[in-house]
Image (tube, rainbow, N blue to C red):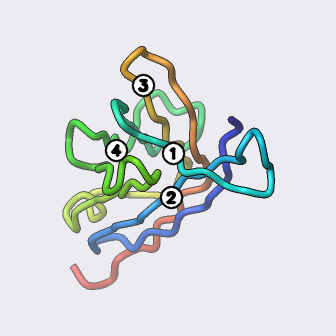
């Protein structure tokens, strides 16, 4: 599965929450979409200044609470950052979101630009 492109805009200093639903074409009928089943998966997302940056500005995972599977069987997950986490971000960048099966297979779901809108009230 090729990763979709989805550009994210985030307001610095505000709580960030985005629900993402993943579907794929039914192999027997490409006009029908099926939900991606996240049962027995974990997820991770990193935001970096550039693709080449050696350090992530933030890493969100199912282990640290930054990503939750809100409806595993129907392909729904939520990406979440607290207001303190977005306040600590200093610049825009790039990101991708991956899921990892219990057998270790990694699938990139989405990727794109991460635009940070600076906070005025601090």
Q: Is residue 52 shown left or right of residue 46? A: right
Pointers 1 and 2 in contact (CB under 8 A)?
no
What residue is pinned by disc 1? 49
Q: CA distance from mark 2 to mark 4?
A: 22 Å
Q: Which of the marked residues, 3 or 4, is nearer the chain's N terminus?
A: 4
What residue is pinned by disc 2? 21
Q: Which of the marked residues, 1 or 2, is nearer the chain's N terminus?
A: 2
Q: CA distance from mark 3 to mark 4?
A: 22 Å
Between marks 4 and 1 in the image, the one whose residue lies nearer the viewer: 4
Rendered view: 3 above or below 53: below
Q: Which of the marked residues, 4 or 1, is nearer the chain's N terminus?
A: 1
Residue 109's image quarter?
Answer: top right
Could you tell me residue 90's position as x and y percent?
A: 38, 57
What residue is pinned by disc 4? 58
Could you tell me residue 71's position as x and y percent?
A: 35, 55
Q: Which of the marked residues, 3 or 1, is nearer the chain's N terminus?
A: 1
Q: CA distance from mark 1 to mark 2?
A: 26 Å
Residue at x 68% of width, y 35% of height:
1
Q: Nearer the viewer, residue 61 or 20?
A: 20
Q: Which of the marked residues, 3 or 2, is nearer the chain's N terminus?
A: 2
Q: Which of the marked residues, 2 or 4, is nearer the chain's N terminus?
A: 2
Rendered view: 36 above or below 100: below
Which disc is residue 101 wearing?
3
Q: CA distance from mark 3 to mark 1?
A: 27 Å
Disc 2 is placed on an element classified as strand
Q: Is residue 44 shown left or right of residue 105? A: left
């Amino acid at each position: 599965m090729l990763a979709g492109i989805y550009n994210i805009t985030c307001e610095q200093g505000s709580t960030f929450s985005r629900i993402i639903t993943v579907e794929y074409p039914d192999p027997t009928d490409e006009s029908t979409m099926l939900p991606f089943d996240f049962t027995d998966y974990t997820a991770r997302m990193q935001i970096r200044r550039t693709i080449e940056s050696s350090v992530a500005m933030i890493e969100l995972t199912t282990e640290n609470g930054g990503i939750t599977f809100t409806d595993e069987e129907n392909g729904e997950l939520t990406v979440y950052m607290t207001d303190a986490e977005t306040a600590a971000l200093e610049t825009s960048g790039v990101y991708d979101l991956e899921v990892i099966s219990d057998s270790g297979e990694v699938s990139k779901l989405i990727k794109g630009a991460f635009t940070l809108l600076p906070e005025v009230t601090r």
